[in-house]
Image: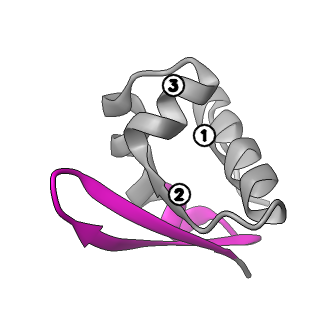
């Protein structure tokens, strides 16, 4: 069983909920605003969550002004 920090759990809960409503693309800034963290806190955790998460697939998708993350159910 994978251990998650409180912040990681909050990020994953937000992503799971959003994906279940049909959203697929996210920016750290938007996630942070929704769950009360900073964009830096979210952005530094997403690559680790991409490796650790078993129920959602997180991949770096694009980089324009900021990185976009594509999230889907595994």
Q: Mark 1 points at which residue?
A: 8
How far across and how far down the image is residue 21, in percent? 82, 60
Q: In this view, does 42 lie above or below 67?
A: above
Task: Provide the residue designation for mark 3.
Answer: 33
* Tag 3 secondary structure: helix
Q: Residue at x 69, y 34 (%)?
A: 10
Q: Is 73 positioned to the left or the right of 45 in the image?
A: right
Secondary structure category for the residue under label 1: helix
- Judge left or right: residue 14 versus residue 37: right
Q: Give the range drawn in magenta.
A: 49-72
Q: Sequence-wise, which precedes: disc 1 or disc 2? A: 1
Q: Where is residue 41 in the image (x, y as percent from the top left)?
A: 39, 30
Q: Could you say whether the residue bearing mark 2 is in a helix, strand or loop?
A: helix
C-beta proximity under 8 Å, tags 1 and 2: yes
The crowd level at tag 3 (other Cα within 10 Å; few <14, some 14-19, many 20+) is: few
Question: Contact (CB < 8 A) between labels 3 and 1?
Answer: no
Based on the picture, tell me whether residue 68 belongs to the magenta stretch.
yes
Residue at image mark 2: 49
Residue count near mark 2 (Cα–Cα under 10 Å), binned few <14, some 14–19, many ≥20? some
Q: Nearer the viewer, residue 34 or 1?
A: 34
Verify whether residue 51 appears in magenta.
yes
Q: Which of 53 and 34 is in front in this view?
A: 34
At 49% from the left and 21% from the top, the residue drawn is: 37
The answer to which of marks 3 and 1 sits earlier in the sequence is: 1
Residue found 76% across the figure and 44% down from its top = 13
Give above or below for 51 relative to 13: below
Vertical placement of residue 46 versus 50, above or below: above
């Amino acid at each position: 069983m994978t251990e998650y920090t409180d912040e990681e759990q909050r990020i994953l809960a937000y992503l799971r909920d959003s994906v279940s409503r049909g959203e697929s693309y996210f920016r750290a800034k938007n996630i942070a605003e929704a769950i009360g963290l900073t964009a830096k806190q979210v952005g530094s955790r997403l690559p680790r969550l991409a490796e650790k998460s078993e129920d959602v697939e997180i991949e770096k998708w694009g980089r324009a002004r900021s990185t976009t993350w594509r999230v889907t159910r595994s």
